[in-house]
Image (cartoon, rainbow, N blue to C red):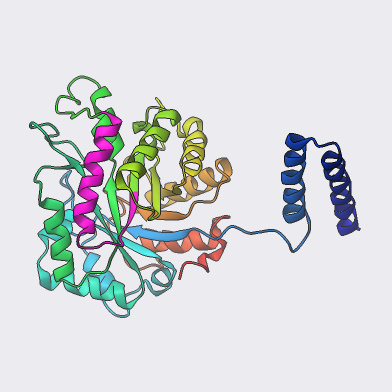
């Protein structure tokens, strides 16, 4: 009976469609055509087109001292050992991300086994780069900067030497720190470069080309904090400018670093317009799922991250192309085992088994 009722609805709209054609009402005809297609594919059982589950990424602080001085993840290198206790989470990962700092600090004996492990386990590698060039001394102590013209090229060359299979270039918040940083309160913004959007896009594209001279097929994932974006309109201008200056057709992913506890710019107010802008400009959208710096224990951090996953899916129905399970906070302090409710691999498994959009993460690998 349910199917018959839906077929009657379709029949009614087909009649309206034909009437519109008969009357030569082209705008109305087009509207009814799209409505009819929506009914056909969304209402008839078995004919809906399901969105794929998001790809799952993971990234940890690593065993280097964090820029803020704390040390966590002393078991970081254990992740890349055979039979390490995160087999289920590992099998669900699409990608793993490390920083340029890690690549340029650790010795070859440490790095090469990591790159080999990722390749053998079919896990894509992303490396985070600062890609805002410093000009006339600007950008000192500002995140996302590159202060030496050859720094990103040298990093790419070292990755190549170590046989790393770089699939993704992760750009660290260029819009936030290259354009908007000047709007920070006095004292925080004294070193801002304050580039206009077109200049910034040209400079970032030049840095991307340096890495792509070594890895020509590497795709881009750009991270930005939702609180670092002035408006959806300006975000659209930036997205167009970056794509125009890159001058290629490789996919680009825009990944949101949501500031969950910001009282000045509640994410619930800004998230949906920003996501829609990203999609309207032809980019993939992604999100970082994490806890907060205020979480005082590993378990509290994981619980907070779980609540953020639930809250985002309740507010934003658009399914992301990928999700990142990541921390750069003092918690969690260890990575293994995945069975402990205090680790990032545990959160990967929780996401895959509990998030409504994850669909079991069956399509990641």
Q: Is residue 39 above or below residue 85?
A: above
- Observer-nearest of 160 and 365: 160
Number of callouts: 0
Quadrant into which the N terminus falls = bottom right
- Observer-nearest of 262 and 133: 133
User: Can residue 295 be seen in the rendering of this structure?
Assistant: no
Position of 22 with respect to 245 (left or right) is right
Residue 187 screen position, x and y as percent: 17, 22
Task: State the residue lying farthest toward the bottom.
Answer: 82
Residue drawn where x is 24% and y is 21% of the image: 185
- Observer-nearest of 182 and 326: 182
Q: Main secondary structure of the magenta part?
A: helix
Per the image, is 349 magenta?
Answer: no
Position of 69 with respect to 322 (left or right) is left
Per the image, is 212 magenta?
Answer: yes
Residue 138 screen position, x and y as percent: 12, 31
Position of 88 with respect to 330 (left or right) is right
Q: Is residue 12 above or below residue 345?
A: above
Residue drawn where x is 10% and y is 51% of the image: 150
- Observer-nearest of 18 and 217: 18
Quadrant into which the C terminus falls = bottom left
Residue 71 screen position, x and y as percent: 18, 53
User: Can residue 89 be seen in the rendering of this structure?
Assistant: yes
Residue 215 screen position, x and y as percent: 24, 63
Q: Is residue 362 above or below residue 327?
A: below
Determine which quarter of the picture holds residue 25. Answer: top right
Give the residues in magenta.
196-221
Determine which quarter of the picture holds residue 292. Answer: top left
């Amino acid at each position: 009976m349910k199917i018959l009722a839906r077929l009657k609805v379709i029949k009614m709209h087909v009649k309206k469609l034909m009437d519109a054609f008969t009357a030569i009402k082209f705008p109305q005809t087009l509207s009814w055509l799209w409505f009819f297609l929506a009914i056909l594919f969304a209402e008839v059982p078995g004919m809906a087109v399901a969105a794929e589950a998001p790809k799952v990424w993971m990234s940890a602080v690593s065993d280097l001292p964090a820029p803020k001085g704390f040390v966590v993840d002393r078991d970081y290198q254990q992740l890349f050992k055979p039979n390490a206790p995160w087999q289920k989470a590992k099998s669900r990962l699409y990608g793993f991300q490390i920083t340029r700092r890690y690549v340029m600090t650790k010795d070859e004996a440490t790095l090469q086994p990591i790159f080999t492990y990722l390749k053998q386990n079919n896990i894509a590698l992303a490396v985070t780069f600062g890609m805002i060039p410093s000009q006339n001394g600007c950008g000192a102590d500002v995140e996302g900067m590159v202060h030496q013209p050859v720094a990103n090229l040298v990093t790419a060359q070292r990755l190549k030497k170590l046989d790393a299979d770089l699939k993704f270039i992760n750009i660290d918040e260029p819009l936030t720190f290259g354009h908007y940083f000047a709007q920070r309160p006095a004292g925080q913004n004294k070193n801002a470069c304050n580039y206009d959007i077109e200049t910034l896009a040209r400079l970032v594209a030049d840095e991307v080309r340096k890495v792509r001279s070594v890895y020509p097929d590497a795709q881009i994932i750009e991270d930005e904090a939702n609180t670092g974006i002035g408006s959806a309109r300006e975000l659209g201008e930036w997205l167009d400018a970056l794509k125009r200056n890159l001058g290629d057709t490789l996919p680009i992913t825009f990944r949101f670093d949501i500031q969950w506890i910001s009282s000045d710019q509640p994410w619930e107010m800004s998230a949906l317009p920003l996501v829609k802008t990203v999609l309207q400009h032809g980019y993939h959208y992604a999100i970082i799922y994490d806890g907060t710096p205020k979480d005082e224990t590993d378990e509290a951090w994981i619980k907070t991250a779980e609540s953020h996953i639930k809250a985002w899916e309740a507010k934003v129905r658009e399914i992301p192309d990928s999700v990142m399970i990541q921390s750069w906070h003092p918690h969690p302090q260890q990575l293994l085992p995945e069975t402990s409710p205090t680790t990032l691999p545990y959160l990967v498994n929780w996401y895959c088994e509990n998030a409504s959009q994850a669909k079991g993460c069956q399509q990641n690998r």
